[in-house]
Image (tube, grey):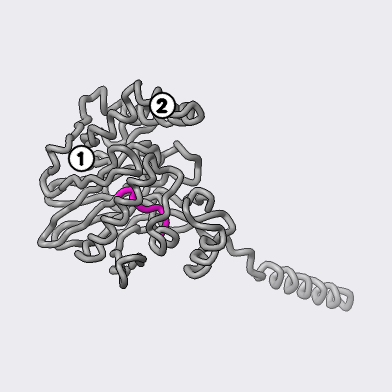
Amino acid sequence: MKNLKPLLIALTLGTATLTTQAAEPSTIQAPKQVSGYYHHQIGNTQITALLDGTNYLSPAMFKGLSDTEKTEILKKYYADQAKGIQTSVNAFLIKTGNQLLMVDSGAASCFGAHLGSIYNNLKASGYKPEQVNEIFLTHLHPDHVCGISNNGAANYPNATLHIAKTEYDYWLNPNTVKKLPKDKQAGFLGTVEKIKAALAPYEKAQKVKVFSDKSLAFGGIEFKPSFGHTSGHYSFKLKADGQEAVFIGDIVHSHTLQFDRPETAIEFDVDPKAAVQTRLKHFAEYAKEGQLIAAPHLPFPGLGHIYSKDGKSYQWIPVYFKD
């Protein structure tokens, strides 16, 4: 018995050591970001912003500013410049009565794994893809149109697409590429293939409506010409309960550079001069009239207002979060 006492003490100490070791906290894994959707109410109409992902653009894509000017503007806004100029890719739902409308659709897999979340974020927001009745495409760049389809099947099987005739013809007329410089033709044709693949199931189902400049309304939606970024680029104005929201499309890509210096074009503009003129005209209008703005490439949720103190430079004022 005398020999058992030291053994019991040793076992007790050993157990205490193991208990202490087991109680030490393990490494806490950081969770992923929450689903990218935001509901915003205008009277009885709900606008839901959907995030497709975050993209980074080379500063060299923005034209007309020196590197020093770009750096100073970005520094002022505390914009992280390590990866490039950050932009969101957003799309929007409009719930009005028994209609669920959509403006743009994101990039799906057309630009890599960092984009393509809109379809899942739409479902996370409480809606179902088959509830979408109409889809309005501001233009046919892949980061706006690729999200309507997946591997030849329509993501929104009950929806009809609305596309401006000028835009539709520019990309899908086989004669367009012949008018482009030789060094631009391969890139253009690559974009066309993505557009055709996205549209295919809707074309087959005869659910593509091409509107002209003479048919500039659909219910509470007005089609608003905003040419320059592409030849048939349109914005869409929604009137609801005495208020207005404008889904501006790609008249702007940066909440920093192109607000401080709105005369700054971007490499993606088909007609840079016209794109700048459109931005200057529309910024002045929206700053004066104070409409809610919904923008695909401003920081998520891309909803806010445009302010100007002097009519020369502008400021993006995002909406305030509401529960």
Amino acid identity at mark 1: Glu
- The magenta stretch spans residue 253: yes
- From the image, tell me which residue sits under label 1: 134
Which structural element holds mark 1?
Answer: strand
Residue 81 relative to residue 41: left or right:
right
Which structural element holds mark 2?
Answer: helix
Q: Indicate whether 131 appears above or below 186.
A: below
Magenta: main secondary structure equals loop
Q: Does residue 124 appear anywhere in the picture?
A: no
- The magenta stretch spans residue 113: no
Amino acid identity at mark 2: Glu
Q: Does residue 114 appear anywhere in the picture?
A: yes
Instruction: Give the number of the disc on residue 195.
Output: none
- The answer to which of 295 and 75 lies nearer the viewer is 75
- From the image, tell me which residue sits under label 2: 193
Image quadrant occupied by the N terminus? bottom right
**Which range is magenta?**
249-255
The residue positioned 73% from the left and 68% from the top of the image is: 18
- The answer to which of 18 and 39 lies nearer the viewer is 39
- The answer to which of 89 and 268 lies nearer the viewer is 268
In three-dimensional space, the C-alpha distance between marks 2 and 1, rounded to whole angstroms, equals 23 Å
The location of residue 219, given as percent across then percent down, is: 10, 45
The residue positioned 35% from the left and 33% from the top of the image is: 149
- Callout 2: 10 Å neighbours few (<14), some, many (20+)? few
The location of residue 23, given as percent across then percent down, is: 65, 70
Q: Quadrant of residue 304?
A: bottom left
